[in-house]
Image (spheres, helix red, strand yellow):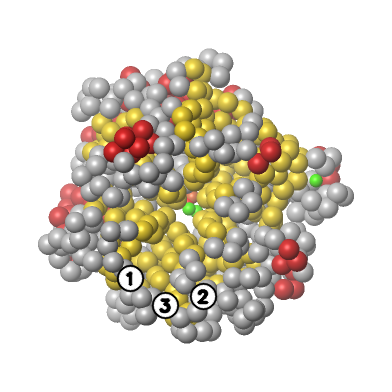
Amino acid sequence: ARGGGGGARGLGFEPVAPNTADALTVPPGYRQQVVIRWGDPVLRGAPEFAPARQTAAAQAAQFGYNCDYMALLDLPRERDARLLVVNHEYTSEEVMFPGYDPDNPTREQVEIAWAAHGLAVVVLAEHRRSGKLTPVAGHRLNRRITATTPFEFTGPAAGSDLLKTSADPTGTTVLGTLNNCGGGTTPWGTVLSGEENFNQYFGNAASVTDPTTKARLARYGMSGGASERKWERFDQRFDLAAEPNEVNRHGWVVEIDPYDPTSTPRKLTALGRFKHEAAEPRLTRDGRVVVYMGDDERFDYFYKYVSTHRMMSGTSRRARRHNRGLLEEGTLYVAKFTGNSPAEEIDGTGALPEDGEFDGSGEWIPLASGDRSFVDGMTAEEVYVFTRQAADKVGATKMDRPEDVEPNPRTGAVYIALTNNTRRGAAGQPGPDEANPRTNNKHGQVVEVMESRNDPSATRFTWRLLLVCGDPNDPGTYFAGFAKDQVSPISCPDNLAFDPHGNLWISTDGNALGANDGLFGVALEGSNRGQVKQFLTVPVGGETCGPIVEEHRVLVAVQHPGEVDGSSHENPGSHWPDGPGTLPRPSVVNVTRTDGRRIGS
Ligand code: FEO
Ligand code: CA
Ligand code: CA
Ligand code: CA
């Protein structure tokens, strides 16, 4: 039966109207609960949040800043408990610290920021009747991983000269993970996390003189002097002129075993190095693992990795050891999208071509496999460490900022959020193509990819745009052909998730329509295909992250609430979630039905 607001199965809720409230707003009949906030205790002995007296030691034992990707895993051996894994992408120092002087950060402030980055692993108690989730502070599985936690390199570039530094002459161990954005959960129970805008932490690129190094740094967005946070003053590894290889040790997908708090987390060189938005695995019919990955930069690429070996099922020690190697040996590919309509019909406005769809075919171009490079003039190690330059050479398609990717567990179709690209069609920049059809693209699009024969390891695919986002009254938008007067406006798709009914859920970052960001459900099958419905909105300046949609709950991470021009500790842009007179706190929110029934029923 359909509930309020109609729509496909699982999407029967009254859509939330666009708004600019400093609140998280849910549909009528739903309730919300803040699960965990920046500064809440995670490890045993962690103090309560006290922002005026914050220390690095306290922060390293508390929930970090700017929560992004989330995995909510089962804990089969414990009653009514779940395991939450969360990325902490970056820090907002001007809000975190009283009287923050961006030109002169103190060592304590910098060390607090290091401790607020990384990931958190937190056991949650699940209250059956109310649906509430509450953190179990001090649980033996709880863990904080920060910008100083040791990681082991794995895969074909581990030990490469390109990864060696004065602190690590073997090129096998690196401290910390930075700018962890999206992620994924593997079928063998580990969590993947993408290191995204790592370039911002490294200073003094302008002082590098070697032309090859300079070109590599420039391709990854580094050419200036001091970094924004000035970390290079407190640890020389962030000074590119002193330690030119340290930056090569960031920009990877990392793998964490959340069930073993003593395990050493790993950086996976076989999956390439770029601004990793996310990493979403799936299995081939014969049990090999395929990981889809976006590089979130204007005009950058969409990638996949295909493992050589098959997954071993079960949780025996032998299976766990075997599966640990799956992301070490395989082939890395980059995508080329070809449209099927005449180029002159893609006029940059978003107007549909004559065949009625933005669609076409594509190919996966191999870059490297193990020690073998497929790219002229680059060794395999160079392909893994400077993957962007390898993809430039083989003619991959320059996309409108590939963010999250999610395979549909029911149909096998793969969805990619392309968030926006206002430089598309600008002077000296690539113009529109059928997969990226709008110039000055402020609102983004969602691509649907179907691998040839629905085989995730195929080297060919077909594709079509599901959504060309924006205000539905704008003729340059497209909602898979659904009636535009019955959809919610949507702008800047970022994270993706599936619900148990096969609907796609999309969270946004940077709404260019003047309202706050939010979370949307969209049907993919039947007569409702393309009907976008807004499920919630987040507070002023916040981004909606990490959506998880289960039968009875929706979980979102509210990242950087209050991130608006001029926001500071003294005058923050938001007071969510604690209310008037308080600092904004990035937090995880649990939404359930007031009557305890299923989401969207
Ligand atoms: Fe961290 Fe591309 O969003
Ligand atoms: Ca077409
Ligand atoms: Ca993102
Ligand atoms: Ca984003």
Could you tell me which secondary element the residue under label 1 belongs to? strand
Is the C terminus in the top left, top right, bottom left or bottom right quadrant?
A: bottom right
Q: Is residue 450 left or right of residue 579?
A: right
Which is more N-terminal, label 3 or label 1? 3
Evaluate if marks 1 and 3 touch, with contact meaning CB atoms under 8 Å apart: no
Residue indicated by mark 3: 32
Q: Is residue 507 left or right of residue 238?
A: right
Q: Position of residue 495 (x, y in %)?
A: 51, 56
Q: CA distance from mark 1 to mark 3?
A: 15 Å
Q: Amino acid at mark 3?
A: Gln
Snapshot quadrant of residue 208? top left
Snapshot quadrant of residue 566? bottom left
Snapshot quadrant of residue 336? top right
Closer to the camera: disc 1 or disc 3? 1
Q: Position of residue 32 (x, y in %)?
A: 42, 77
Q: Residue at x 69, y 38 (%)?
A: 453
Evaluate if marks 2 and 1 touch, with contact meaning CB atoms under 8 Å apart: no
In the rendered view, would you say 171 is above or below 350? above
Q: Is residue 78 left or right of residue 451?
A: left
Which is more N-terminal, label 1 or label 2? 1
Please state which of residues 57 and 564 is positioned toward the viewer in this rendering: 57
Q: Residue at x 34, y 44 (%)?
A: 315
Residue indicated by mark 2: 598
Q: Position of residue 415 (x, y in %)?
A: 61, 50
